[in-house]
Amino acid sequence: MQKMKPAAWRLGAFLAVCLLGTFALVTVFADFRFNKGETYFAEFANVSGLRNGDIVRIAGVEVGKVTKISVQRDTRVRVEFSADDTITLTDGSRAVIRYDDLIGNRFMALEEGTGGLKVLQPGDTIGLDHTEPALDLDALIGGFRPLFRALDPERVNELTGQLVQALQGQGPTINSFLTQTAAVTNILADRDQLIGQVIDNLNVVLGSVGGQAARFDKAVTSLSELVHGLAEHRGELSTAVAAVDAGASSFADLFAEIRRPVQKLTTELDRASVLALNDHEYLETFLDKLPDKYRALNRQAIYGDFFSFYLCDAVLKLNGKGGQPVYVKVAGQNTGRCAPK
């Protein structure tokens, strides 16, 4: 009994994995949907090939399924479909039936068209004027039946023989050409959505340009007048351009000549700024006293274009022993303007 427990556990795990795999396969291939959806309706004139359970897509992404198809008394076809609750449909939304593959399967595509922006509520209907049925290939091919019947089999055989003779020996070239054509066709088929977006964008641009035709015409007229005016004054413009060129050359020569003096001046200014920074206390004191000195000089000159000076002291500065300065007073007075204050 103890030996069977590990085998039973392994068997149970294997069966659980198989059940999960089977459930996943059934979910994927049966297109089960677990998202909550809302129900809407759409009216068509023809839904040939559309069946219950077909996919509903927006921009190539599955968002729901066709749940019911019924024919009304007025021969219109009413299609009931579900869509994710995250999808917003408006009065301008369109329902189009398209081919899903080459064997005739269809799907219903929801697109944004022209119309109001009012949001459709669950249970609302997309009208017949906002729906489009799928292309009926049977009817299209059937339209060529009279042409096929009118063809003479002998003429067809003769034409085929002539084509074979004309293309005799060109098999590899034709094969390569057809291969490249198929590749280009596949690329264009893969880019159909992008090409559609480009065409839509071009339609928007052309519509905007068409809506602004008056302004566009005025802008073109103004540009034409500007070009015409420039053409009339091309002589003056040429002279002005030549003068500007001569002025630029003169400035270039001037800057070349003053480059060295300016460089020397900059160097001397740098030295002067260093000296002023080192003796900034004396410079600040000098600048503080300078206004008072200028006011005193201004008072001296109020009597005319001369200055009046009074001799209060005359002192000689001599070099004494050991280079020490010796001051000798020659004359002096301490009265009048020279009286101490």
Image: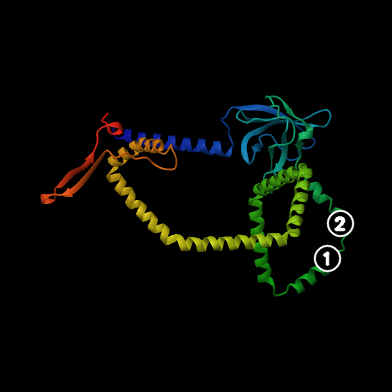
Give the quarter of the image for residue 94.
Answer: top right
Q: Is residue 247 visible?
A: yes
Q: Nearer the viewer, residue 225 or 304?
A: 304
Residue sitting farthest toward the right: 150
The label on residue 156 is: 1
Q: Residue at x 85, y 64 (%)?
A: 153
The residue tagged 2 is 147
Within-10-Å neighbours for mark 1: few <14, some 14–19, many 20+: few
The quarter of the picture where the C terminus appears is top left
Identified by mark 1, the residue type is: Val
Give the quarter of the image for residue 81.
Answer: top right
The quarter of the picture where the N terminus appears is top left
Measured as percent of width and height from the top left, residue 164 is found at 76, 71
Q: Is residue 101 visible?
A: no
Measured as percent of width and height from the top left, residue 73 is found at 83, 28
Q: Nearer the viewer, residue 3 or 102?
A: 102
Mark 1: which secondary structure? Answer: helix
